[in-house]
Image (spheres, coloured by chain):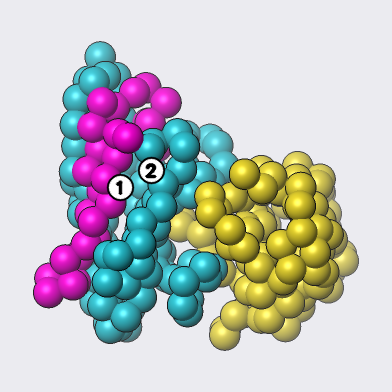
Chain colours: A cyan, B yellow
Amino acid sequence: EVQLVESGGGLVKPGGSLRLSCAASGFTFSSYSMNWIRQAPGKGLEWVSSISSSGTYIYYADSVKGRFTISRDNSKNSLYLQMNRLRAEDTAVYYCASDYYGSKSPFDYWGQGTLVTVSS
Amino acid sequence: AIQLTQSPSSLSASVGDRVTITCRASQGISSALAWYQQKPGKAPKLLIYDASYLESGVPSRFSGSGSGTDFTLTISSLQPEDFATYYCQQFNSYPFTFGGGTKVEIE
C-alpha cells in the first residue's frame, strides 16, 4: 500500500524557517518525481514545487522561488521542503504527492497534509 | 503561467442529476489535464487523467473530455458521496496550475 506521510508543520513567526518532510513507502520512491502542493485555509490548491526522480530537475512556483528549497533522499525514501523567510500568505496545509508516471504527470498519491501557520 | 478557469464555482444538484463542470485553459495544453475530487479535511483524489482516462477504482459515472483549451468533467448520475469540491489541473508545462474549484452541494 502506498503511503505518503508529511511532518514538520507548525506555528512559525514571519521571517522564520521550517522544514517539511514526506516519508514514502509502498512504491519505488526513486523512480518517481515528487511534488509539494499547498492549500490555504478555505482556498483552492496551489502547486508549490516539483523534483525529478534523481533530483536533477527542480521547479518552483514564482510565489516561493528563492525562499523554498525542495530536495529528496532516495536512500531514505524521503522528500523535503525547506521553507525560509516565511510570510503570512504561506499559511496553508502542505501536501506531498507522487507523480502518476514520468515527468509532467498528474498526481496519483497524496499525503494527509501538514499545516503550516505563519503568524506573530 | 497557464491559467485554468473553472465554471461554475459552485452548483446545487440532487441525487441522480447529471452534472457538468468545465475547465478552460488560457492556452493550449493538449490533453495534459487532470480532475481531482476533494472532500472537507481530506487530500485531493485523482479522478481523471490525460483529460479522459478514468483512474483505477473511480466509478464509471465520472467521465472527462476535451483537448486543447476546453475540458469537461461529467458525473452522469450524482450520488450522495459525490458532494465535494472538484479541481482541474494542467501538467502540460511548469508552473503547474489548478483551476479555482467547483463546489458541488446538495440541492
Reading the chain from its start, which is encountered first: label 2 or label 1? Answer: 2
Which picture quadrant has residue A111? bottom left
Q: Chain of mark 1?
A: A
Q: CA distance from mark 2 to mark 1?
A: 5 Å
A57 vs A25: above or below:
above
**What element does badge 1 sit on?**
strand
Instruction: Give SS at disc 2.
Output: strand
Chain of the residue on which disc 2 is drawn: A
- Residue of label 2: A93
Residue plotted at (81% across, 47% down):
B7
Assess whether residue A84 is covered by the magenta stretch.
Answer: yes
Q: Is residue A44 left or right of residue A88?
A: right
- Crowding at dot 2, Cα within 10 Å, few <14 / some 14-19 / many 20+, comes out as many
Q: Are marks 2 and 1 in contact (CB under 8 Å)?
A: yes
Residue B12 in percent (x, y) is at 81, 48
Magenta region, residue range: A66-92
Q: Amino acid at mark 2?
A: Val
Three-letter code, disc 1:
Thr
- Residue drawn at point x = 71 percent, y = 62 percent: B29
Name the mark on residue A114: 1
Looking at the picture, how far across and down is residue B34, in whole percent?
Answer: 64, 66
